[in-house]
Image (tube, grey):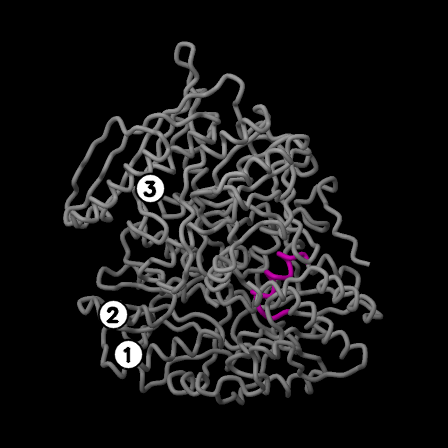
Amino acid sequence: MTTTSAPTPSIASVGLNCPTPHSTHDCVVLGHGSGGKLSAQLFRERFLPHFDNSVLRQQGDAAVLTVGNSRLAMSTDTFVVQPLEFPGGDIGTLAVHGTVNDIAMMGARPLYLTTGFVIEEGLPMDVLDRVIASMAAAAREQGVTIVAGDTKVVERGKGDGLFINTAGIGLLDADFAPSADQARPDDVILLSGPIGRHGMAIMSAREAIGFDTTITSDTAALWPLVDALRGATAGHVHVLRDPTRGGVASALNEIAAASNTGMMLDEASIPVPPDVLAACEMLGLDPMYVANEGVLVAIVPPEHADVALAALRAHPVGANAVRIGHVVAQHPRMVVMRTHVGGTRIVDMLPGDQLPRIC
Amino acid sequence: MKYLSEYRDPQLAQTLARKIRLTATRRWTLMEVCGGQTHTIVRQGIDELLEGSIEMIHGPGCPVCVTPLEQIDRAVHLAGRPDVIFTSFGDMLRVPGSDCDLQQVRARGGAVKVVYSPLDALTLAERHPDKEVVFFAVGFETTAPANAMAVAEAARRGLRNFSVLVSHVTVPPAMEAILSAADNRVQGFLAAGHVCTIMGWTEYEPIARRYRVPIVVTGFEPLDILEGMLMVVEQLERGEYRVDNQYARAVKRDGNQAAQDTVNKVFELRDRQWRGIGMIPGSGLGIRPEYAAWDAEVKFDLAGIVANEPADCHAGEVLRGQMKPFDCPSFGSRCTPEHPMGAPMVSSEGACAAYYNYGRFRQGSPLANPAMTLPILATT
């Protein structure tokens, strides 16, 4: 490159100014669906004022309902993933695992599912067949029954191939009711496995990125782990959460806010598979915010932590479970991490989607 | 991953931090030029580890932060045109223009696509011959070669529906501008490793000599940063001022000649506005006249777009290292990532975003509650 002969100015001599940007939204942006601050704001400001009731206000992964003498957990989720089939799974397995996991996180045994398909005109029939078959297999594997369904077909260009909604219902035991507001100082934070696999598997398979990797989605049903935790701790589990959209960071921030406690994490203990870490580094993403579909966060009293960890590790889905930190009183509603080099940093909710960096 | 974990080893980091504290006989003020390094420093708490020995001030090396508002407005204008597919790196989508950002343009129906390489934008242009595909070519010397290559490749293929909106800036003139300022406090630099991968470090040698300031080409991992700091401090303690290379695994003295040739073929040096700082002569790159057919500013009529920037934000002082984000009167109150006043609070490489997202509970932060301030690990 050639060099300039122009005189170099002093920065002090040039004007200082900066714009006042606008960040209010007069229409929905993709960040509203990211699971971060914008999603929470959308729910709080748009939906809750109209739908408000005591059950919805709890904002758990699933609603807890009392019907006669039974306590039920009920949840719904809609799956809009692209591509429809990805390394380690497809939209069908996700649609089953996502909803049964939401029910399981309330401590309920998932029993029944319903499903709604929104199909875009032109979807190859063999893709639809494979998705339905894998949904059925995932449901059978979990012992849940798909009891009702609906299909709609939209014109080409009005959908993204296939959207699937599932709703589910599960049964709660009287003596087991984990919820986000129950985290207490000194509780131990457990993570059932390595993070970031689902999000990075999806990203690697997207047409616009398409990097070569062996990363597969971690999609899995988590009820067996929940059942094992319940048995090992005699029901002494304060919080369960599956950190899907927004990743482990968002899940822990939600728990900290709901329980008015702080979280102290140890960066070195958080398992990130090497290929996930490499892909995140390449794109400038933080694995703490990348979606998972087969791990859970369990917050348990310290006296039950060892036995809970052993119970998780006894199951193949939780074989690599670890302690990642503990709950503290010092900085309520804030998640803080002890870094690799011994400093500290906040692990915040993201305002919107994580966006890959320039360089 | 071994290649990364090697550069994050806690014991080695503690050893290097101790060595810096033992070497420094006084508190030195260093600037890391690059926003990526700023984030490593604040995210890993490296500045906490060296409190008392080193004061880090943060340089203007965030490409998103220094892109002029006018250029963002031009991008927003182009992205809103029905005949345009506007492509950009992800970072730029949330950067606010005068009225809205690219994300909002997309939500309102504009064809805005995130790409991971300008060559992806080129592919889009081939697939959509009925549309004009514009790529937002932003960044320092690091991204310039690929962006230049996209223009050269479009020319080679005769692809007339592709153009780039250029907002490239270069590091050395900005370093000189900082050092020339009457109130300059910078005593040593960590130079941006990625930039030097392309450019090498020969252009820093006259700066080190002229301003008697040590410059160390430094990588981005915690151990890179700590080692780079130690190398600068060792020079300062000995009264030396030269360019050293900490990032030898990636950077050669003359950089990447092929990449430089591509840049020189397509771009030429221009005067450039730096957002929040102002005009720095010869600090930017623009498309050479022979490639004007692929220059979005020539192809589209953008001359009428003039931005007026209000002056109630201190981002400029942050960008030139004269104010720490914590010292800004708007930090964390009127200015947050959800409601940013300046680009450094919204960019993934911005200094204000790093302080807010990773360190707003720390001592010195206007948001810190003394009871919440956490002790760092024992480092002796």
Instruction: Give yes or no for contact between labels 2 and 1 (Cβ–Cβ under 8 Å).
Output: yes
Q: CA distance from mark 1 to mark 3?
A: 42 Å
How many other residues sit within 10 Å of disc 2, few (<14), some (14-19) or many (≥20)?
A: many
Q: What amino acid type is highlighted by mark number 3?
A: Thr
Extent of the magenta region: B32-45
- Name the main secondary structure of what is drawn in magenta: helix
Which residue does the numbered mark 1 point to in the structure image? B154
Q: Is residue B211 visible?
A: yes
Question: Type of residue at label 2?
Answer: Ala
Inter-mark Cα distance, 3 to 2: 36 Å
- Neighbourhood count class around disc 1 (C-alpha, 10 Å): few under 14, some 14–19, many 20 upward: many
From the image, tell me which residue sits under label 2.
B125
**What subunit carries mark 1?**
B
Residue B196 in the image, given as x and y percentages of width and height: 55, 79
Q: Nearer the viewer, residue A23 or A28?
A: A28
View extreme (top): residue: A68
Position in image of residue A152 (x %, y %):
18, 37
Q: Chain of mark 2?
A: B
B67 versus A349 height, above or below: below
Return the residue at label 3: A93
Both labels 3 and 2 in a single chain:
no
State the separation of the CA atoms marked 2 and 1. Answer: 9 Å
Element at badge 1? helix
Hey, what amino acid is under mark 1? Ala
Residue A128: say if magenta.
no
Q: Is residue B44 magenta?
A: yes
Q: Closer to the observer: label 1 or label 3?
A: 3
